[in-house]
Image (cartoon, rainbow, N blue to C red):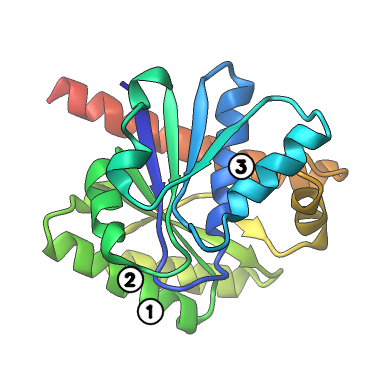
Amino acid sequence: MAHIIGLIAQKGGVGKSTLSRLIACEFAGQGWAVKIADMDVSQGTCAEWCRLRQQHGIEPDIRVETFGRVAQAISDSDRFDLVVVDGAPHATAATLEIARTSDLVIIPTGLALDDLRPGVMLAHELVEKGVQADKLVFVLTRVGDSLAAIEDARQFINRAGYAVGVAELPERIGYQRAMDAGFAATETTHRSLNEKAEAVAQDIADKLAGLVMDREVA
């Protein structure tokens, strides 16, 4: 049975699909059989990215399928090592199901309160409905160069009672250009950008491994 990482958000434009592609590529690069389940049936952002990737012959190969229901998305999970569930751009009825089904839930957020507040409210709602808080992890995305702003965002999330990744993904045109060509955030033409993205992916991998180990011990 595959491990499942769900990516959800209360609002669009916070880097959810960027992280989905990043996670999938990094795990696939380590020899894992990976599938992205794109839950945005109207736009199919990850599905279109996969088409570009295949068109340009980019390795590792990532399988992407679009689904309207979470049960469909994970129905063949026994064929994969990892299923990355890329939720819809906004919270939907399926968001809770994604959170309940996933081993690790990533909530991407920018630094502005307009991003942070909806993300924390979504996390609170999920916990109130029975989702374990320890599997919810915020990842700071599209950040600028202000270390003070990054630290303020971290403190905001921590005060709300949630974990936040130790690495963050900056706002850079290099990432957008890479994805427009079918690449992931670790596959840009800039080594420094790739290293920043690799740090985010490694942190997510470590958190998944920790959660899985804790549950196996329990």
Q: Is residue 210 left or right of residue 192?
A: left
The three-letter code of the residue at mark 3 reads Leu
Q: Secondary structure at mark 1?
A: helix
Distance (Cα) linking label 3 and label 2: 23 Å
State the residue position of label 3.
Answer: 22
Asked whether disc 1 touches disc 2, contact meaning CB atoms under 8 Å apart, the reply is yes
> Which residue corresponds to the image point at 30% horizontal and 21% vertical from the top-left?
1
The crowd level at tag 2 (other Cα within 10 Å; few <14, some 14-19, many 20+) is many
Tag 1 or tag 3, which sits nearer the N-term? 3
Q: Is residue 126 left or right of residue 41?
A: left
State the residue position of label 1.
Answer: 117
> Which residue corresponds to the image point at 25% horizontal and 42% vertical from the top-left?
101
User: Residue 120: which numbered mark, if any?
Assistant: 2
User: Residue 44: which numbered mark, if any?
Assistant: none
The three-letter code of the residue at mark 2 reads Val
77 shown above or below 107: above
The answer to whether any part of residue 82 appears in the image is yes
